[in-house]
Image (spheres, rainbow, N blue to C red):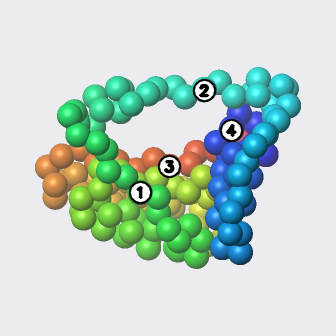
């Protein structure tokens, strides 16, 4: 698992296992994470108050979604999904935790089309909208 990403670890282990349709019931009772791995995680940089200030949204819940399917979309089609979701009333969308730079949709392409979609949605709605991109990579250079 990626250093510094508790979210990636838990999404990969817990999210994927709990998503199996063949399982009728499942309960996680214990999960031990090596201390050395935990020390690579610095915690979130901001919280909900900062996000509310950035999006100028107070007194109501945020409405967001994760882009699905995460696999098989081109960068252009991914951007289209982002735009349609924001235009349809979502405050933000986000990348699935496990998506990064895939051969069919490289990170930079996804970024460019997603940001174009966000800017179009902001112009159409007259309010702040957003998309949270997975910016993790195998190395710092990536």
In the rendered image, is residue 16 in sight? no
Residue contact between numbered discs 1 and 4, judged by CB atoms under 8 Å: no
Q: Please report whichever mark, 4 or 3, sits nearer to the chain's N-terminal start.
A: 4
Real-space Cα separation, disc 2 to disc 3, in angstroms: 17 Å
- The residue pinned by badge 2 equals 43
Q: Which mark is residue 133?
A: 3
- Secondary structure of the residue carrying tag 1 is strand
Percent position of residue 22, x then y:
71, 75
- The residue pinned by badge 4 equals 5
Real-space Cα separation, disc 1 to disc 4, in angstroms: 20 Å
Specify the quadrant that holds the C terminus: top right
Q: Residues within 10 Å of mark 3 (few under 14, many from 20)?
A: some
Q: Which mark is residue 38?
A: none
Specify the quadrant that holds the N terminus: top right
Q: Residues within 10 Å of mark 1 (few under 14, many from 20)?
A: some
Compared with residue 83, is residue 94 higher up or lower down, i.e. above or below? above
Q: Please report whichever mark, 2 or 3, sits nearer to the chain's N-terminal start.
A: 2
- Secondary structure of the residue carrying tag 2 is loop
Q: Hey, which quadrant is residue 6 in on the image?
A: top right
Percent position of residue 23, x then y:
71, 69
Real-space Cα separation, disc 4 to disc 3, in angstroms: 14 Å
Percent position of residue 95, x then y:
51, 55
Compared with residue 89, is residue 69 higher up or lower down, i.e. above or below? below
Real-space Cα separation, disc 3 to disc 1, in angstroms: 12 Å
The residue positioned 33% from the left and 60% from the top of the image is: 117
Q: How many marks?
A: 4
The residue positioned 79% from the left and 40% from the top of the image is: 31
- Secondary structure of the residue carrying tag 4 is loop
Residue contact between numbered discs 4 and 3, judged by CB atoms under 8 Å: no
């Amino acid at each position: 698992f990626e250093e510094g990403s508790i979210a990636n670890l838990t999404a990969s282990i817990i999210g994927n296992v709990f998503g199996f349709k063949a399982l009728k019931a499942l309960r996680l009772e214990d999960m031990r994470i090596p201390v050395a791995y935990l020390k690579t995680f610095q915690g979130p940089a901001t919280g909900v108050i900062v996000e509310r200030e950035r999006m100028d949204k107070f007194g109501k819940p945020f409405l967001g979604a994760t882009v699905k399917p995460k696999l098989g979309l081109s960068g252009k089609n991914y951007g289209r999904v982002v735009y349609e979701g924001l235009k349809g009333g979502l405050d933000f969308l986000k990348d699935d935790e496990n998506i990064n730079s895939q051969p069919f949709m490289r990170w930079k392409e996804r970024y460019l089309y997603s940001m174009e979609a966000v800017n179009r949605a902001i112009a159409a709605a007259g309010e702040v909208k957003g998309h949270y991109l997975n910016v993790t990579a195998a190395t710092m250079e990536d």
